[in-house]
Image (cartoon, rainbow, N blue to C red):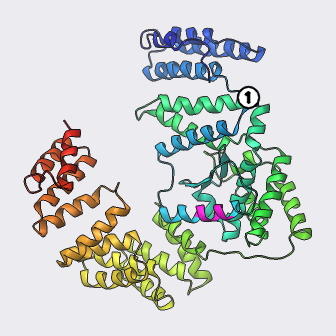
Amino acid sequence: MNMCFHMGSLCMIEAPHNIAGNVLYIIEKIPSQTNLDKTLKKGYIATVIMRANTNNKKIKKILFVFGIFMCLTFCSTFSASALTVEDEKKLGKEFYEKLERKGVFLNDRIINDYFNAIGQSMLSQGKPSPFSFTFTVIKNPGINAFATPGGYVYVYSGLIRISENEAQLAGVLAHEIAHVKCRHIAKILERSKKVGIATMAAILAGAFIGGGDETTAAVTTFSIAAAASMNLKYTREHEEEADRMGMSYLVKAGYDGKGMLDFLKIMRQYEYYSNSIPSYFLTHPGTGERIAYLDGLLQTTYKKRGKEDITEKYERIKTSLILGETNPESKLKYFENRLKDKPDDIEGLYGCAVVYGDMGRTEDSFRNFKKALLLAPDDADILRDMGIQYFNLGSTGDAIDALQRAYCIDEDDEGTIFFLGRAYDAAGNYRSALELYEKFRKGNPDNTDIYYNLAMIEGKINNQGESHYNFGIYFKKRGKPKSALFHFKEALKYIAPESTRGSEIQKEIDSMK
């Protein structure tokens, strides 16, 4: 990416004094490589002039940002015709990191591991790829899935919500994997340089603007939209190739190929569902032709039926995803509808139990928990969440009983580890609590609150040095350096400076000077 004029020229602009003039200056400096560029420049100049005579500071700020954006858009050259595998990797990684910093990803290790496992299963059915694939769930009710260069595949939580089985989700991932492996995006960019540059510029513009005003919000939204449109728009030939290859991956992995066809029909019903985010069908055209083509493949090539669910985790993953949503009425409606269709549905009973508990309907909550456990007595998730419910109500003994049972079934579940530790702590079993807190910390070193729990429990067993050390880490992570420094210095009064822990504490102190 090369700037067409030296960045020093941009740095010399006096932004606040005469913004309209500065914007015009920037636009005039942009070289016009085509007649389209010249026409666009004239339009931009006219727009700036019309809005220049205003005292609205917000509009002036937007004008200035707009000028920089146009500079980035037209002064950047992206040689799409020479887009290499390494270029794709860099572009995909850059974009992934932008979205990650915006906090749009679903932060649930179990759900992400589940999707990664399905994605890797699809990948293993085809030829090796030069890309290392990353599968990510985006927290958004939109019905969408897309891939960006370099092996990054994204699925919206809203798309997962409307799915009916694992084969349908696997089909979506298989289709997107095929797009990446065929390098369809690179081929589109070779023919659509303007679109590729504009997308890149939108992402860069988002990185330049800070703060929490409306401009930032708008750019953030546009950057997310740019993610979905990074696919640009596939041709019908691209879609046919991705469907053909994706169906092959899906069936070879043991799934029912009908899942790909059925889910395409389901998604078509929601084609106009999302108003704020690009629909799946804006980048994946030819829905009718795709349905006919997939149906033909199933009738001729893939007659043998596979499985709808291979991992046997789909139902619980979907339950966990819905329980993580913020609207209690929407969640409750989903689970109650499941029970209308099947009164002994374990997921419906479990989901209702959790939501009822969140809504303060304690009797309804425990009635559903107990009914679910009669049907699935060794379900660690149900035992865990019932234990958490008991703990939150102050019933420590019942909490320990349920959480111990859950822990015996799954010793690695983070929620069980943490709340069983808290329950032991509340019951005065400090040594057992400390053991579980430490286990949780090892798996979650970035969790801030665990250091507070460790500090408190160490103090209760009269281990003052470790207590102060953990308080130091806690306050450091909370952005309170003075409090952190105080506790680190106090810790050294109890811990030998030449010990391993003493050296760690001294490093913390030195880093804060």
Q: For residue 49: magenta?
A: no
Quarter holding the C terminus? top left
* Placement of 249 over or under 105, stated as above or below: below
Q: Position of residue 252 (x, y in %)?
A: 77, 69
Q: Where's the N terminus, which quadrant? A: top right
Which residue is denoted by mark 1 in the rendering?
193
Visible residue check, residue 359: no
SS of the residue at dot 1? helix
Towards the viewer: 201 or 159? 201
Q: What stretch is highlighted in magenta?
A: 115-121
Q: Is residue 497 left or right of residue 276?
A: left
Q: What residue type is labelled 1?
A: Lys
Q: Residue at coordinates 62% horizontally, 82% vertically from top-left?
A: 341
Residue 470, given in percent of the width and then of the height, sits at 21, 56
Q: From what the image shows, is residue 410 above or below residue 513?
A: below
Residue shown at 88% from the left, 65% from the top? 297
Residue 196 falls in image quadrant: top right
Residue at position x 52%, y 42% in the image: 97
User: Left or right: 153 with respect to 185?
Assistant: left
Q: Where is residue 274 in the image (x, y as percent from the top left)?
A: 64, 50
Query: Is residue 228 something one can see in this rendering?
Result: yes
* Crowd tier of the residue under label 1, counting other residues whose Cα lies within 10 Å: few below 14, some 14–19, many 20 or above: some
Towards the viewer: 339 or 451: 451
Callout count: 1
